[in-house]
Amino acid sequence: MNTAAVVAQKFSFWYGEKQALHEIELNIPDKAITAFIGPSGCGKSTFLRSINRMNETIPGVRHDGDIVLHGQDIYERGVDVEDLRTRVGMVFQRSNPFPKSIYQNVAYGPRINRGLARRQMDELVEKSLRRAALWDEVKDRLGTNALGLSGGQQQRLCIARALANDPEILLLDEPASALDPIATQKIEDLLFELKGQLTVVIVTHNLQQAARISDMTAFFYLGKLIEMDATNTIFTSPREERTDAYVTGRFG
Amino acid sequence: MSGSDLGPGLRHFHEQLAELRRKLLDMADHAEQLVDQSITSLLGRDRVLAESVIAGDKVLNSLEIEIEQLAISLLALQQPMARDLRSIVGTIKVSGDLERVGDHAVNIAESALRLVDEGGAITPSPELEDMARRSRAMLRDALQAFTNADGSLGRDVCKADDAVDALHNSVFRILLTHMMEDARTITPSLELLLVSRNLERVADLATNIGEDAVYLAEGKQIKHHFED
């Protein structure tokens, strides 16, 4: 497997008094797809959001241990959080495009982060929409409001918006759970295309989805990482009894 | 994590898994019985029993098809994972092996019929009876290992195969001696050699099932010394 893009070392996390993560130790391979699975409340989304420090927007939280992104400890003093979130893009369960044009949605990040000439910006918008497999569907109406797109298109637009910042890592929290099978298939195809270009980490409740698209799968339960292995191993012969019980639907 | 508080959907799936298991056990019982009867018909020169073995193989064939159909629909509709996946795929393979066991029993019964017709005086050596006993025991243990997901019993079955192979070699040498001493024994000796060969194959199939039991129980592939 590739070298690690993200390394967690004894990472723990608390919401006030409640401990949500217990000493998570794992390596997320570079330029591959890693899936986090586990029942609701198991900590998988909390861990995902810890990778770009998204949890810090919640009052009363604290953490212990480290998360190292391509050699840099992201919780170190002096780390620019805005810069971190440019390097680690995120897409949520419910698509959340800005109530602006399709073009402006994609150009939003680069406009703030980089001073690009109009022509370069046009190229970047096209490239990002192409990477998100949306270009052909929207190229004739870039100026129209993004909220007029279908749910699946909006979600791919959010992926395009994240890709426009050229992130090293793309985090996705249940990106397809509100979509129909065809829109879901498009998102999965797109993630497949992105593999090899950047590191993808996806939280999903859909085990078949995790099995179909990911290279590695991590199973979380009650705030602990129970087992992480090649996806094929997790879904055919996991080491841990609890993983077996979860993936066969016996609990969770 | 127990199976007692399953919802109706998962309960339905588990009932179908149990049904699949019942069919496999049925098939296993039947296959063992055929091997048993084929050997008895051979030793006792029992034409009626040999003919019933040949007729009884049909049941195995239709059970194999039923198992395959149920297993394929479970794979398609339930998308099973981990232990359930290994169990269903294993069941398909084991039912194929049992169908082959039935074919070997039929071959032995056919040899028995030809030996009855031939009416020669040559008696099967004790080695052949020993082989029959061991192959049947291996088959029984392998199926028990598979149905109980008992990896250690599965490994024992694989180890037991060497003794049967060695017996097959002894039978071959004994029959060769007969044939060299007295040309009139050639025809019955060749029949008995075929019987020995069929028993050796039954033991090989039992070994396959033992390997499948290990994979089911432990998720480890031990075929072709894969583990080493």
Image (tube, grey):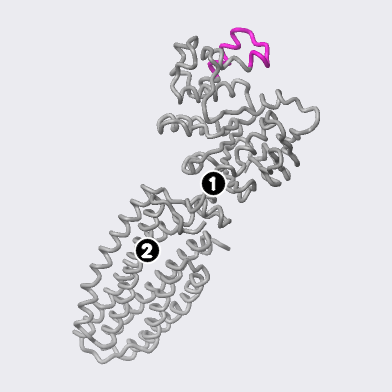
Query: Which amino acid does the dot numbered 1 rest on?
Result: Thr
* Left or right: B205, with B111 as reference point: right
Mark 2: which secondary structure? helix
Disc 2 residue type (three-letter): Arg
Residue B21 numbered tag: 2
The chain ID associated with circle 2 is B
In percent of width and height, residue A115 lies at 67, 11
Q: Nearer the viewer, residue B111 or B158?
A: B158
Tell me where residue A200 appears, x and y as whole percent: 59, 34
Q: Position of residue B43 (x, y in %)?
A: 29, 87
- Depth check: B90 or B21 in front? B21
| Secondary element at tag 1 | helix
Task: Identify the magenta region.
Answer: A110-127
Q: Quadrant of residue B202?
A: bottom left
Q: Chain of mark 1?
A: A
Q: Quadrant of residue B122?
A: bottom left
| Badge 1 density bin: few <14, some 14–19, many ≥20, Cα 10 Å | many
Residue at the spot of label 1: A231
Q: Tell whether position A200 is magenta.
A: no
Residue B201 higher or lower than B227, as above or below: below
